[in-house]
Amino acid sequence: MNMMKKYKIVVAYEGTEYFGWQQQKNLPTIAGTLEKSFFSVFGKKISLLGASRTDAGVHALCQVAQFNTDLVISPQRMLQAWNNRLPSDIVINQLEEVPLTFHIHAAVERKTYRYHFFLERPLPLSQRFGWYFYYSVDIEKLKKALHVFVGTHDFRSFCTGDEREDTVRTIDAVSVSFNRQLQAHVIEIIGKKFLHYMVRRIVGACLDAASRDFLSINCLREALAKKDPEQTLPNAPSKGLILHHIEYQK
């Protein structure tokens, strides 16, 4: 009988055609596609656990996942054969065996999300990767708005409202830059752990505040303090969000 081993993979995907990471019955998902393709190549069932449960339409450059299998094959051959069966919008960049004690969530040091938005109509090749925001945005006000969320807060007002877990999270850093190649502004948010919809709700609220003279940054502080997920500030669309990097403890 072959011994069970644990593996870690790093996956990149273009999430437009998928209903998120998590396996869903009768719907195409990233994890579901990976699991089905593994079975079709090796004849073995696996169950993937991802470090981040990205939503429908969200992209990733560095999603990390783990799985167990008793398949006897080198990691290099497994990676090559598995990638050959995947669709063009999913690719496994790394695959390695890890100790059985490794856990995909416990070892996370920090996650980096990036959100792209366009202030002018984007080129067709890049429009899938950002939000075309029609209104004029005060970038300096946007930076100040984002800094409201830096630090440790109860983010219950900026999640789905369905969370049964503790909604206190810490954002380590935020920044706004401009990507000349994509002609897109990029909001970067770094933290160890995020709630469902949290980044998109923060981005939507901050862009709303930065595009309206009458909406003060204090409105964001008030919304955060109320801890009410029914607040009416907008939720940024999923296609602008990219899971950019996950850093693990060494």
Image (cartoon, helix red, strand yellow):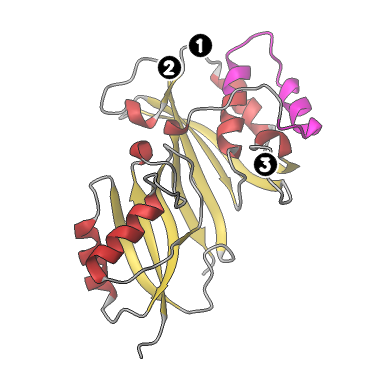
Asked whether, in this view, residue 128 is left or right of residue 104, the answer is left
Q: Which residue is mark 2?
A: 119
Residue visible at 36% across and 80% down?
70
Q: Which residue is mark 3?
A: 162
In the rendering, which numbered label is found on residue 164?
A: none
Residue 206, image quadrant: top right
Task: State the image coordinates of residue 174 (x, y, percent, origin top left).
Answer: 58, 38
Image marks 1 and 3: residues in contact by CB distance under 8 Å: no
Asked whether, in this view, residue 141 is left or right of residue 102, the answer is right
Image marks 2 and 3: residues in contact by CB distance under 8 Å: no
Q: Amino acid at mark 1?
A: Ser
Question: Label 2 vs label 3: CA separation?
Answer: 32 Å
Task: State the image coordinates of residue 242 (x, y, percent, origin top left).
Answer: 43, 40
Crowd around label 1: few <14 · some 14–19 · many ≥20 (10 Å): few
Asked whether, in this view, residue 199 is left or right of residue 98, the answer is right
Image marks 2 and 1: residues in contact by CB distance under 8 Å: yes
Q: Which residue is mark 1?
A: 136
Which sits in the foreground, 186 or 226?
A: 226
Which sits in the foreground, 44 or 48?
A: 44
Question: Label 1 vs label 3: CA separation?
Answer: 33 Å
